[in-house]
Amino acid sequence: MLNPEVAPGEFTELDRFVFESWGYLVIPGVLSAAEAEECYDASKRLHAARERAFGQIGRGYEVEPCLERLIDHPAVLPKIRGLFGDRFILQASWNTMQPARGGIGGWHQDGSSAYNFNQVGYPVPLIQLRVSYLLTDQSRPGSGNMELIPGSHRSQVPLPDDVRAQRGDVPIGHVICAPIGSVLVFHNGVWHRTFRHDGDQDRYTAHYVYSPPWVRPADRLANADDFLERTTPMRRALMGEFERPDAPYGANYEPLPFE
Ligand SMILES: O=C(O)CCC(=O)C(=O)O
């Protein structure tokens, strides 16, 4: 099926139109196969102490340098800046493991059980922009792909409960087929799920979620001091460690240190 593919780097007006229309972008070739494999091995280490079942682990960037580098990857950062402007944070990072022969996941939009984003307004506002690095080849359906419903971030009605309860198919479900090292960028409002995985290699995907700076981080209550000390000024700022004067009006967050 057609993919909403865009080139790495600069966020063009056409990229914006594609994102607004579909709710997501696919950027092929962000990581080389070797870089993706390095991140795959790092992901394996992160999940090594847990049972071999579907699960997500946060804060991998603190312990694995190759995962830290993805926080501000130059192929992707301009897309996030294009959508959020000069002020945003890394709200969370989730490294997801789907075991070989893993089943299909549940349909959902990203959000919160506390005053969910769809209560804030219509269309569902962009609050969490998710960037997913595919660390395995997902060129064919049934390789632990993500499945998204194009344009569903603009739907005034939710996906019907019975379809959700049965984990059923939707005629416009789009199984993202893309090679290793590709990146998927998507709006929190897009209905999506984990597609089935028929292969025999566990699947890891490294997700980075970006938000406006007034959103509370979700993978940490506080940043780790040693990580802040050794990381770069841009990453430190993306962790939310930048000046936010205690003033009653908006527009007082410092912009990120681009360049
Ligand atoms: O399968 C995955 O990696 C992503 C799961 C998912 O949909 C989510 O974390 O919101």
Image (spheres, rainbow, N blue to C red):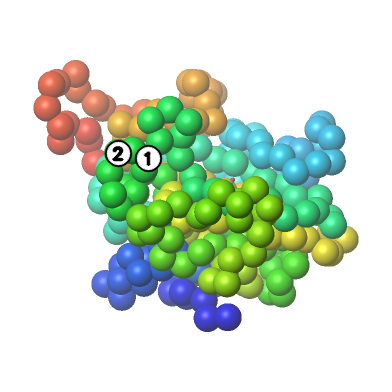
Could you say where residue 175 lies in the image, as x and y percent from the top left?
62, 69
Identity of the residue drawn at 33% across and 38% down:
119
Could you say where residue 214 lies in the image, as x and y percent from the top left?
30, 31
Q: Is residue 166 above or below residue 227?
A: below
Front residue of 114 and 251: 114
Question: In which quarter of the view is residue 239 placed?
Answer: top left
Question: Residue 117 got which mark?
Answer: 1
**58 sits left or right of 136 in the view:** left
Within 8 Å of ligand 1, the CB of disc 1?
A: no
Identify which amino acid the numbered label 1 is placed on.
Phe
The residue where tag 2 is placed is: 120
Q: Residue furthest bottom?
A: 2
Within 8 Å of ligand 1, the CB of disc 2?
A: no
The kind of secondary structure element at disc 1 is: helix
Identify which amino acid the numbered label 2 is placed on.
Val
Front residue of 1 and 154: 154
Asked whether the beta carbons under mark 2 and mark 1 sit within 8 Å of each other, the answer is yes
Front residue of 100 and 180: 100
Could you say where residue 9 lies in the image, as x and y percent from the top left?
40, 67
Q: Residue furthest right?
A: 200
Q: Can residue 15 be seen by looking at this rendering?
A: no
Question: How far apart are labels 2 and 1 at the CA level?
Answer: 5 Å
Q: How many neighbours does mark 1 have within 10 angstroms: few (below 14), some (14-19), or many (20 or more)? A: many
Question: In which quarter of the view is residue 50 placed?
Answer: top right
Identity of the residue drawn at 58% across and 80% down:
1
The kind of secondary structure element at disc 2 is: helix
Q: Residue furthest left?
A: 249
Count of marks overlaid on the render: 2
